[in-house]
Amino acid sequence: MKMQAQFDFEAAPGLPGSDAISRVHYAVIRSLTRRLWRFTIDGVENVPTAGPALICPNHLSFCDSVFVPAALPRRCWAIGKAEYMDSWKTRHLFPALGMIPVDRSGGKRSAAALDAAAEVLDDGRLFMIYPEGTRSRSGNLHKGRTGAARLAIRCDAPIIPVGLIGTPEIQPPDQFTMSPFKDVTVSFGEPIRAGDFGSPADPRIHRTMIDAVMFEIARLSGQTYVDTYAGKKDDAREEVASRPMPPDQQVSVPPTKPVGRTGGPTRPKGRPAVELSEAPELAPGD
Amino acid sequence: MIDDHDATHVALIEDDVVLTYGELRDRVASARARLAAAGVGAGDTVVLGAGNEIGFVVASFAALGLGARPAPINPYAPPAEVRRKIEPLGGAVMVIGEVAPHLLADDEGYGLPVITTNDLSGAGDAPAIIEVGAEEPAFLLSTSGVSGKPKVAVLTHGGMAWVQQSVIGDGPEQLTADDIALGVLPVAHVLGLNLALLATLRAGGAVVLQRRFDSATSLELIRRHRITMVVGAPPMWHRWAVSEESSDAMASVRFARSGAAALRPATVDRLERVYGVRIKQGYGLTETSAVVTTGRGFDAPVTSVGRALPGVEMVVVDDDGAPVDIGDVGEVVVRTPGCFAGYLGDPESTEMVLTEDGWLWTGDLGVLDDDGFLHLVDRVKDIVIVSGFNVYPAEVEDVLMHFPGVRAAVVVGRAHGVTGETVVAHVSGDVDEAELDAWARSQLASYKCPTSYLRVDDVPETSTGKQLRRELKS
């Protein structure tokens, strides 16, 4: 472990996981991560010791949502499915890790999640969000959703890019348990601020900012970046249908594609067809 | 379009020549007789090698009245280029204006009969005006187009008229017969043709024609004729912004519009400070008969090109046609009554951009904000992909242009063995390359920074100030 910062439990009475049981759970989790795995933490000095910030890691494994909070010097919060609160296995553990349950049914799920995130940041706390939206099944780093940049601008909070290495080996997809005694590294990059990308009123900086975040995550994690969203096509159709459109820009029927574009001859050189993806997924939700 | 207006009302002004609507109609009728005598009939193409001059307007309306299709070309192009341009048009006759004596002087000819604008008077009664349907072709306009290769866009009577009427609008910002427009944008370009010239004439207003842009002369014309509508391209607005003219030069202007390319926010602010005019930016293409979005009627953000015109459907999509998130970058796709009928004799190119149900894939990248304002990013085909990351040349160019001494900057991609592509900047101006590179690195993520700088004297541009990146791609 390169750096072991002093941990601040940071009680937040208005947020989940601030009770005595959660404090004990959190301490146990932090301790176990350091005893059961060869846990390396880099760049923790980049995490602000006070005030709001978005923690944006790559997402390869379910256990990412354990190792990132365990590596931080402060508590952080994230959005998770409300169903976790129905299970005895996760009812106490996940709030201790900072999960805010959000009902994700219906068409407004993304907006509800972002509103909940904004409340955390406006309260001066850390909030974790996976910019890829969901786990990468390919192992590549996928295109970032702009939600994190929108949050950063809305709440005037920096984004801390985070690179995780080793978590798929600890808990591969579809494995319920975490295999011990393996290497895991969490690297925190320097804060990225919206003000460095132009006027916050210019919506074009959302993409510019999140691309800069993904570039840093790629550097920290060593992953290959691909300019497609992570996720499955079937999930995406529902999400696209529920995605809000600006006023006056509603279209009666989605546009069709020119027949001459079959096979993608007019796509930019080297640019693969974009995969549709599922709803923006916040930690620790999937 | 011009037949119902007051015969005594001024329609066109060029230097000391003032033409009323009555006089214009007489000249058009006479020209109709002349073109008919030259064999022009319904469905024929009349090539117009004329500029921003009265003869262009007369010849255009005369051809339209015969059911023919005016096809403006750049009259300042050399004869050899003109021959190449007119070949696919299949013209019946070519009309050459006063601005293009070099075209007349060429001995090789153009393979079709040539008439000058000074010889547009025909003997005898003018043939009756042929009524044509809204779907019928009107103007044929050359364009590098959505997919980059030179083509001829077929604009329809109905599509052009719909855009003109949209530009006229209603309410307090309606364009009326009392308005006077500056006609300085090239009439061979859709913005100069359909917005500055034809929309004004449809409204019954007057157009002051200026053959070639000159900042001081334009401002003098605006002041002398109390011009109320100025439609300019960004280079023109920039020149006016930095001119030494007095601040009351645009006191009469109530419509200040910019299109064809993005206008820098600093220029918008300076024009408002110096002249008290607030530029309204719009967006459109030759293929949409000029306009699909407008900033008119809104307090649009300075970085935006406004909202879709009423009646236009617009959405920003990914490669599969799915709408992207608000605030994310995608291709601008529109369905508009102003849409063109296709590219002349080029169904393959048409199918690349236009669907059977009328969606036009513009090839422009943009972002829609929460209020429905469109913010343009770049062209799809100009994206440079470095290690999988998209680099938008316009963003890099904007950073380079903010460095003191840089006159122009054009960024293109070049193949790279490791990263796929790399960013190359062509820069003109008196700058130290190391200092410029340090500036770029302080402003841009490392993958967006140019890996080489090539010094050029000038960057190629279109007549309306769009930089031609494709000519610098290696």
Image: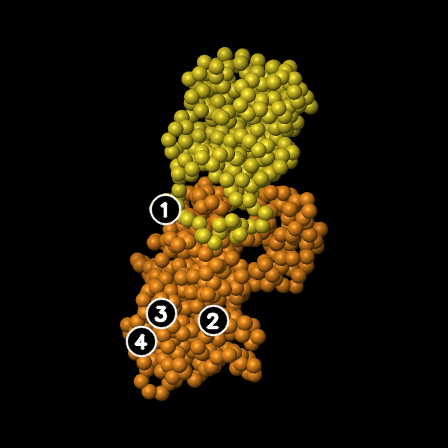
Chain colours: A yellow, B orange
Q: Cα distance, mark 3 to mark 2?
A: 27 Å
Tag 2: amino acid: Leu
Q: Residue at x 59, y 32 (%)?
A: A139
Judged from the image, the secondary structure of the residue bearing numbered disc 3 is helix
Q: Determine if marks 1 and 4 fall on one subunit.
A: no
Residue A74 in which image quadrant: top right
Name the residue type under label 1: Val
Distance from disc 1 to disc 4, alpha carbons, whole Å, reads 40 Å
Residue type at mark 4: give it.
Ile
Relative horizontal placement of residue B338, taking residue A131 as reference (left or right) = left
The answer to whether the residue labelled 3 contacts the one labelled 4, judged by CB atoms less than 8 Å apart, is no
| Residue matched to label 2 | B89
Which dot, 2 or 4, sits closer to the camera? 2
Residue B129's mark?
4
Q: Position of residue B281 (x, y in %)?
A: 44, 56
Residue B398 placement (x, y as % from top left): 58, 52
